[in-house]
Image (tube, rainbow, N blue to C red):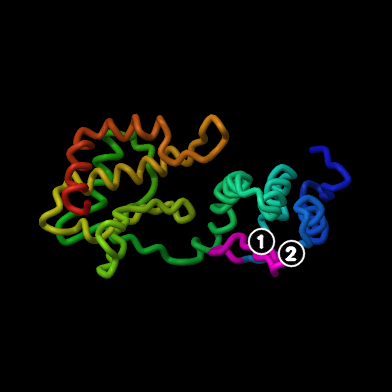
Amino acid sequence: MSTSKNETQVENRWEPQALQSFLSENSGRNVVLMVTNNTSSIISFKHDGGKVVLLRAHRMFLDAPAEVASALAKWIGGRKNRRDIVQEFIDENRGDICRGEYQARRQIVREEGTHHHLGEIRDYLNATYLQNRSTAPVTWGRSNGKRKSRSIRLGFYDPVRNLISINRRLDKTDIPRYMVEYVIFHEMLHEVLGIGRRADGKRDIHGKTFRLLEHTYPFYEKALAFEKMKWG
């Protein structure tokens, strides 16, 4: 990688002061950089009302390529459309920087529910529709009874832990198996396909390939209709 005078890197790695200077020069702001190990808040910045910007960034950005550092500078300077490049860099590297933290913890997977067994459903879907390409365990998560029905999250794939969590609201007698299958299958597709990219370079979470594969589930329309009837 070639570098200009404004892209001072040592063996493709930024020194904190060099990165701070680069961001200041290319954002039009006086950037004060604080490098952190915080994995829950990878990056944040705030203005003091003037030209000074306090930037807190995970140390992964010390390994950021010049185009990512440039996008970050432009984002700090007010060009919000450059945020996607920064977010893509975070998504690509979050697993590596967090993996050690999660490996040190014991990951508890609760597959057996009162009415639905997630492990059995996962294995069936994996073998039937995904050629056993999925590796993520599936666990029952928490159900927030205070959350309004219209905003509940039925499932979630965590790429850092490679874990699919299913809302316990689905573990009830009035929830048909095909509904649980659909939610698990949806999240398994997120795991197997990852985050796609649109023609303009922006992130595409539910791209064409995702939608095509999602429609291979035979009860897709039925599950959507049930979801709409049940939760609006």
Q: Secondary structure at mark 2?
A: strand
Q: Residue at x 34, y 56 (%)?
A: 165
Work out how far the residue at label 1 is from the one at label 2, CA to CA, in angstroms.
7 Å
Which quarter of the rendering shows the N terminus?
top right
The single residue placed furthest to the right in the displayed view is 5
Q: Secondary structure at mark 1?
A: strand
**Mark 1 touching mark 2, by CB under 8 A?**
yes
**In the displayed structure image, the side of residue 50 where residue 194 appears, left or right:** left
Is 79 magenta? The answer is no
Specify the label residue 57 is tagged with.
1
The single residue placed furthest to the front in the displayed view is 49
Q: Residue at x 21, y 47 (%)?
A: 228
Q: At which x and y percent is residue 72?
A: 68, 51
Q: At which x and y percent is residue 88?
A: 58, 45
Would you call the spot at circle 1 few (<14 residues within 10 Å), some (14-19), or many (20 or more)? Answer: many
Q: At which x and y percent is residue 59?
A: 68, 60
**In the displayed structure image, the side of residue 146 where residue 25 appears, left or right:** right
Specify the label residue 33 is tagged with.
2
Q: At which x and y percent is residue 106?
A: 42, 66
Q: Name above or below for residue 42 compared with residue 200.
A: below
Q: Name above or below for residue 191 compared with residue 207.
A: below
**Range covered by the magenta-colored residues:** 38-58
Identify which amino acid the numbered label 2 is placed on.
Leu
Q: Residue at x 17, y 39 (%)?
A: 222
Would you call the spot at circle 2 few (<14 residues within 10 Å), some (14-19), or many (20 or more)? Answer: some
